[in-house]
Image: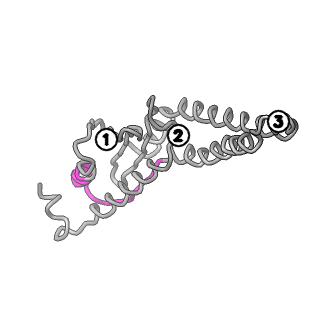
Amino acid sequence: MQLEEFQSKIYKRSKWDKILFSGLAVSFFSMGTFLLYDTINNSSKYEQHTTKYISISFSLILIITPLWCYYFIKNKYKVSTVTSLLPINNKEKVVIEVISKYGNPIYEISDFCYTVLIRGNWYTADRIVFINLDEFQYSLSIESQLQVGKTLFDLGNTQKIRKYIIGSIKILSVDNSERHGEIFNK
């Protein structure tokens, strides 16, 4: 599968997630703006109940959090590439080696595209990692799964996993048979 086909598969898959997260961010921002506006215009009402500073603090949190989350929404659906001229069978061994560092994850392979489920902790959501192999590069995309009772917005963990996987692929893809011969000779 070429890079363009892989990108269209990822973008088509994540279309409704983007709409959901963007809608939640806009609604939180709107609630925070309304609460701040109401607190400023009706300050006597809030001073009477001694909740003026609590209301201003909560409204600022409702305004700042969605702006911060828009950064992560933009990065959530990013397709990263790593250039490598290794043969496909060596690339498969590298991907399996990188996947095995996450314990024993569930994965499936179709047309040189690996779909890996990485289980999260009790407070982090599960992640689905898509790794596509072609002649000249690895393509990678990571999606955080929306789960009840776990984080609704991704707080940077997907970016950390992406950096770790890309770094591992770069290290293991070095075509130096002396240093990495144990991986390619399995």
**Label ID, residue 135:** none
Q: Considering depth in this image, is 59 or 69 the residue closer to the camera?
A: 59
Label 1: element kind: strand
- The residue segment tinted magenta is 79-97
Left or right relative to 170: residue 16:
right
According to the picture, the residue beneath numbered tag 2 turns out to be: 153
Calculate the distance from the C-alpha at mark 2 to the C-alpha at mark 1.
25 Å
The answer to which image quadrant residue 34 occupies is top right
Callout 1 crowding tier (Cα within 10 Å): few <14, some 14–19, many ≥20: many
Tag 1: amino acid = Tyr
- Residue type, numbered disc 2: Phe
181 falls in the magenta region:
no
Residues 66 and 19: in front is: 66
Locate residue 171 relative to residue 15 in the image: left or right.
Answer: left
Which quarter of the rendering shows the C terminus?
bottom left
Viewer-closest of 18 and 39: 39
Please tell me which residue is depicted at 45% across the width and 28% down the height of the picture: 148
